[in-house]
Amino acid sequence: MSLASGKPLYEAVKDHVRARIESGEWAPDTRIPSENELGPMLGVSRITVNRAFRELADEGRLRKVPGVGTFVAEGKPRFGLLTLESIAEQIGARGMRWDCTVRRLERIPAQAQVAALMDLPVGAAVFHSIVLHRADGLPIQIEERHVRPGHAPGYLEQDYGRITTFDYLRRASEVQEMEQSVTAMLPDRATARQLAVAPGEPCLLIRRRTFRDGLATTLSQLTQPASRFELSQRVRMHLPARGAA
């Protein structure tokens, strides 16, 4: 067995692994060949396979268990705790199809709580949207956003069935700071119905504010079933030198 040429070998190994996952040959929780086994099979070095496995693990496609082996990860979207990411890209990275329904897209006066969190006068105009995101047709997230109009003047004119609100906001203006919290909650009946879960099924609630030049530009509330959603991120630690105060 050999890899197609024309791209770096580690990328070709990643394509090989992804193809077997997406075809169903390697199902979730399947232990795949080790780095020492797959290297000779594909005619590449162990170092090359190690890099491919490491990047696929960072993407959430593989799960490495020290001393046991490397397994195909469950195919549910994975979101970073310290980064801003597009839900459509994260769903697509799992080989799943993203689509959505826009429930609300409007200009409204800011109520007291929203105004306080966005440093606006009560009644000031804000853009407001509610979007239900799906992965392979299964509801994955209810996204509610309030947006400062001057931050993204064209927010209400976009087709969010083709581009996510996140992707438009990413293009419209730079985010300099983010504040984010995650809590567990039980959905009310209306939320459970939208997400197609039982009323007693736990959900995760992400509350997020983004800032530019010290001003809150967006206020978002993201609700998703805990069983269909993963919060995970790998970061490099910057520890003080040994012996430092």
Image (cartoon, helix red, strand yellow):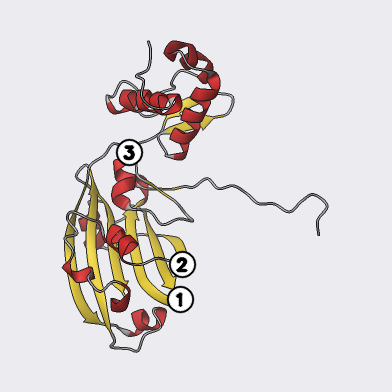
Picture coordinates of residue 125, whole percent (x, y) = 26, 83
Q: Residue at x 37, y 10 (%)?
A: 1
Look at the picture and state if 59 lies above or below 36.
Answer: below
Amino acid carrying label 3: it is Arg
Apparent side of residue 64 relative to residue 226 in the rendered image (left or right): right
Image quadrant assignment for residue 121: bottom left
- Provide the secondary structure element on which disc 1 rests: loop
| In the foreground, 32 or 184 | 32
- Provide the secondary structure element on which disc 3 rests: loop
Q: Residue at x 51, y 29 (%)?
A: 51
Q: Residue at x 34, y 19 (%)?
A: 4
Sequence-wise first label, 1 or 2: 2
- Provide the secondary structure element on which disc 2 rests: loop
Image quadrant assignment for residue 194: bottom left
Tell me, yes or no, whether the two marked residues, 1 and 2, touch with CB atoms within 8 Å: yes
Look at the picture and state if 152 lies above or below 59.
Answer: below
Q: Residue at x 36, y 20 (%)?
A: 5
The residue at which mark 3 appears reads as 94
Amino acid carrying label 1: it is Asp
Give the alpha-carbon distance from disc 1 to disc 3, as whole Å: 35 Å
2 vs 3, front mark: 2
Q: Residues within 10 Å of mark 3 (few under 14, many from 20)?
A: many
Q: Residues within 10 Å of mark 1 (few under 14, many from 20)?
A: few
Sequence-wise first label, 1 or 3: 3
Give the alpha-carbon distance from disc 1 to disc 2, as whole Å: 7 Å
Look at the picture and state if 210 lies above or below 43.
Answer: below
The residue at which mark 1 appears reads as 213
The residue at which mark 2 appears reads as 176
Q: Residues within 10 Å of mark 2 (few under 14, many from 20)?
A: few
Give the alpha-carbon distance from disc 2 to disc 3, as whole Å: 28 Å
Q: Which mark is residue 8?
A: none
